[in-house]
Amino acid sequence: MAIPSVLPERPSIGTPFQTGWPVRLADTDREQRLRLDAVARYLQDIGFEHLDAVEEGDAHRGWVVRRTVIDVLEPVKWGERVTLHRWCSALSNRWCNMRVQILGSAGGRIETEAFLIHFGIDSGVPTRMSDRFMAPMLASTTEHRLRWKAALTDPVPDAAAADVEVLPFPLRVADIDVLDHVNNAVYLGALEELLVGHSDLITTPYRVIIEYAKPLESRDEVRVIGHRVDHTLDAWLAVGDEVRAVARVTPLENRRL
């Protein structure tokens, strides 16, 4: 299923799950902008709150993020209070696309969609969701045969090329989550490191796509490899010659509030 140029709107049937909180200082940069890694943490937080609010949520605690799309239409800023809405925009019986809309009290607006795979806590493999758990998801979308297709397939460029940037990204103890992997929000922290030299890309509405290929682990020596062509910035997180994640930052043409 290809990523649409405009993410699906809230469904006209059903009630998306809603929560909210203030934007805190630790989640923002020097320009008071909500960072991308903080957006990823927001998506995790509302996801677990949502599980606590639905039938059989306690039996569906294992999830892996395969891809996240983040459309920043208007930056969310420190001092705003955000309201988050979450709903299913497509699914099969083992994975789903979950939309989260983040609205700031002063006009910030971020639209996201994540491809999530449900897996068994004990088995560690993709596992069918129960009928009762899927019922509200099925009701919010007509796309019930979701399939995975990678959006970012370009090969990693030669790190020695003149137009390629390579940044070391040392991992910390605080980056490791309960699954003994690097938390997926940390990958977007690495992208923020690269974006420091490309700040023009985030001064107008922009899209970030990140696809996770293989988990990072605590002893990995990670490099961020960046390559920009015109207004598109591609990034690969690699350990040795193995790519663990790939990301792309592009402008959202003709998108304004």
Image (cartoon, rainbow, N blue to C red):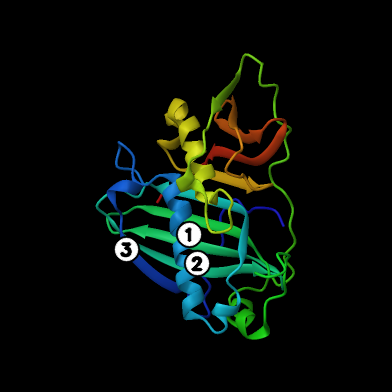
Tag 2: amino acid: Gly
- Element type at mark 3: strand
Q: Which residue is mark 1?
A: 43
Residue nearer the viewer, 9 or 77: 77
In-image side of 27 versus 133 (left or right): left
Classify 84 as above or below 16. above
In-image side of 72 versus 144 (left or right): left
- Contact check, label 1 and label 3, Cβ < 8 Å: no
Q: How many marks?
A: 3
Residue nearer the viewer, 188 or 250: 188
Q: Residues within 10 Å of mark 1 (few under 14, many from 20)?
A: many
- Element type at mark 1: helix
Q: Which residue is mark 2?
A: 47
**The furthest residue to the top:** 162
Tag 3: amino acid: Trp
Q: Which residue is mark 3?
A: 21
Quarter of the figure that contains the N terminus: bottom right
Tag 1: amino acid: Leu
How far from the left and from the top, in percent, is residue 140?
A: 58, 76
In-image side of 154 versus 4 (left or right): right
